[in-house]
Amino acid sequence: MHREEERGGGGGREGGRLLDLDGTHQGNTLPTIQPLPPLETIAHGSSPSLPPMDPAGFKINRWQNRNFDSGVQTMVHSQTQSLMSIHPSEISVMSGMTEDVTRQDLTDAQRCRFERLSITPSGNYEQSGLPELVQLMKDDDEAVVYKAVYMMQNIAKMDADHPRDRIICGAYVAAALREVLERRSHSNNIVRVALGTLFYLCNHPDGVRDVVELVGNEPSLLTHLIKHMRTASFSSYKYAILSLHSILSDRSALGQAATAEARRRDAISPAVEVLRPDQSEKLLPIIVDLIRILCEKSHDQKNRFVELGGVARLLEILQRCNYENLLWRTTKLLVQIANFSPSSLMTCSAPSILHTRLSHGSLRLVLCLLECLRALSDVASPVGTDATPILSSILCLFGSSDPYVSLYCVQILSNMIANHRTNKEFLASKGVVPTLMRVLYDSTLWVNTDKDREVSEEMQECLLCCLLHLCKGHEYAQQVCSHVMADGNSRLLLDRLYNMRPAVLRQTLLILVQTSPLDVNLPSFRSTQLQTKEDIPLTFVHQVVIILRVAFHQFPSAQQGIPLKVENVKVVELIVSTLSILASLCRDRRLLEETIYHFLQPLNSCIGDRRVFLPLFALEQPFIQDDSMTGPALNLLLMLISPPCNQHVSSILSTTQWLYQVLQTHARRPEQQIANPANSLLSILYNHSAISHDRLLPQYDNYQQYGASTSYGGYPMASSYPPPSHHSHPHQHLPPPHPIVHSSMVVPSSSHSSSSSRPQPSPEGTPAHNLSGRSDGTMENIGPWPEDLQPLEGDPFAQVFCSPSTPPSPAPPAVFDAYAPPLPPPNNQYPYPDPYHPHDNY
């Protein structure tokens, strides 16, 4: 015994720890290690009794650890922290996966191979003693190889447990393990220990980088890992999955190259094979995340996963398992597949499974479930599918305090009821309008940061879109429209108009397009007022006219023919909606007078340096070149000029010479929604053209001398819609002007205002036209008659206004009387404190 002790004792010291294989040890004490059983005993799974320990066996046993089982080896549920809850390179929960291995009966010759082996922590590979152990891993004797690999596994585990005192440095051990896997692939016992060693190497931050570097040079290591993902003996597939996951989780360039190589070697096939609900709920999250890494940014891998039936396996896990981390990672992978191939999830009835988990207490899981349902909500469901349980589950989440939960819920509802009559009727029958209005009101209360504003605006847009879907296309549409305009709700909609945010503005206007034609809603449009920050009552008509004016200001002449957008919203859509709303509201006498009143206000009658009448401006197609607004503009003009008609409006329209030719052109069009109002307008204008105009109507060609600004709340009107927080009134101290008339109204002075100079219908019934070619109605000396005007050369009307020999009389200067009394509001009905203060710059 004394000789044996003297024969031991080799070793070195580093970091305060002396590692040797004799009976004495200094520094940090290593755990006592039990001897190994024979290979054939281990292979059959028996547990032989321990033989008496001799000195040589004790030296060998110093490297065998008895480890604590955290639940992964036995696959028994435990409270140990999940492997997926920390970075893959720092996984420690699998420390108990090493099975207890009892002493192996080695021959004296085999024992002698290990007796003088001494391992020392050293930065120098040659001095650490590891080269001798690596050589034993390459030995021809299988028992020696097994013992050497098993000792290396314990060293790797100690490195993972004590990262600062690392013994294995570099990729040489990983290279030796690759060679062992290649040469000893027939020995399941050696394969299991080699894979376990590789797993512990990957648990160290530097160790996983060494392994990834080796994979870059020797990709065959991936082949062995992928192969052994199917090896069930000694749970070798678990080590293979964990090691491969650690390698592919590396975000370096070499790690991404390893991921691409694993895809080429079809690593996803064995991963799907082991993706079963009967697996341990601690191992399944790693398998799911491994598949996610392989599928990430790879359509081929996602398609392969779908072909292998992976979607059905994920949904089965979602149904049968309860581990929150597993459910969350499973749903994250389903979101990836749903964005790639939603039909594959719909085939497996995924929504009916996903919505059952919405009552889970985990917020991150609920958000993932809603994100997946959102990706599927705009996909057609199989015929006969009942979506009411899903809609009910979504409605239950509207009380959540998390804004993203509400946002996802609204987006799902909006997609599910679009063009779906049954779903609309179900929500309407549940009285969802007050709930949506409450969420719309609450969406502005928690806004504190720029990110909050983006989420809030997106939520408001989706809520309004959902309300818009409910306002049409089903049995209860009219009831919904009346509820939307109920007291309180109408003020909320007016507030959305007042904020002037383009995306929200578009949806709000579309809702008003649906609600304004209903007579039951006219009282709300008349009575609803919003007290602005300037203590000025704002009405629907007033704000809609402001929106129309600001929308027209977005069209600089340099961009003719280009579809203009403001924050990704087409300005033409805003114009069409405002024209349609005003045309519907003008069937009410009071709203008609209010509309005319605001159209004639100075600030609403200026586009750039031009004086305009906004409904007429919409027909100047050479400027805007969009035919979608023609019908709404004609309908609005028809409502404004229909008897009994406002004197100023009739004067503007009847003396706008180019309007007759435009109306004649539209009257011949095949579209009845355009031809019918054009014909009606022509008929009314024929009657108005015969009425004498004794009053001198001033011109406002030089609008800048009046002092009106072309800014909107401090922002250029032709640039963008302003943020809602800016409000100013740059003109509130200006004297009240005269009523506004259109710049194309050309009326001669009083000395020339005779019946012979007024426009009269031609003998053929053709209305008068402005043949000078100028949109503002002024005339030029056009010289000889153009060829296309030869038929009108003898027309008395044409001779008066377009004679080539007699230049027309110059237009009288613009008349501005700062002290003239203001035009009263129509019928003195409007409650504005001072109707001539241009208070509509918000």
Image (cartoon, rainbow, N blue to C red):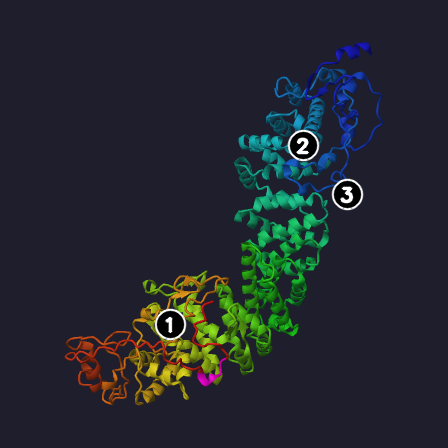
> Is residue 795 shown in magenta?
no
| Mark 1, residue position | 627
State how far apart marks 1 and 2 are (Cα): 71 Å
Asked whether, in this view, residue 430 is left or right of residue 295, the answer is right
On the question of residue 227 being in view, the answer is no
Using a 10 Å C-alpha cutoff, classify the residue at mark 1 as few (fewer than 14 neighbours), some (14 to 19) or many (20 or more).
few
Please, is residue 535 above or below residue 2 in the view? Answer: below
Distance CA(mark 1)–CA(mark 3): 69 Å
Amino acid type at image mark 1: Asp
Magenta-colored span? 826-830
Image height check: is 747 above or below 27?
below
Element type at mark 3: loop
Q: Position of residue 476 (x, y in %)?
A: 60, 77
Q: Quadrant of residue 401?
A: bottom right
Q: Which mark is residue 78?
A: 3
Q: Who is closer to the viewer here, 91 or 699?
A: 699
Dot placed on the residue nearer the N-terminal end, 1 or 2: 2
* Earlier-in-chain disc, 3 versus 2: 3
Instruction: Name the residue: 62% across, 30% down.
Output: 207
Q: Position of residue 826 (x, y in %)?
A: 44, 83
> Badge 2: few (under 14), some or many (20 or more) residues near its Cα, within 10 Å?
many
User: What label does residue 155 carry, if any?
Assistant: none
Residue 200 is marked as 2
The answer to whether one can see residue 700 in this image is yes
Q: Is residue 758 left or right of residue 70?
A: left
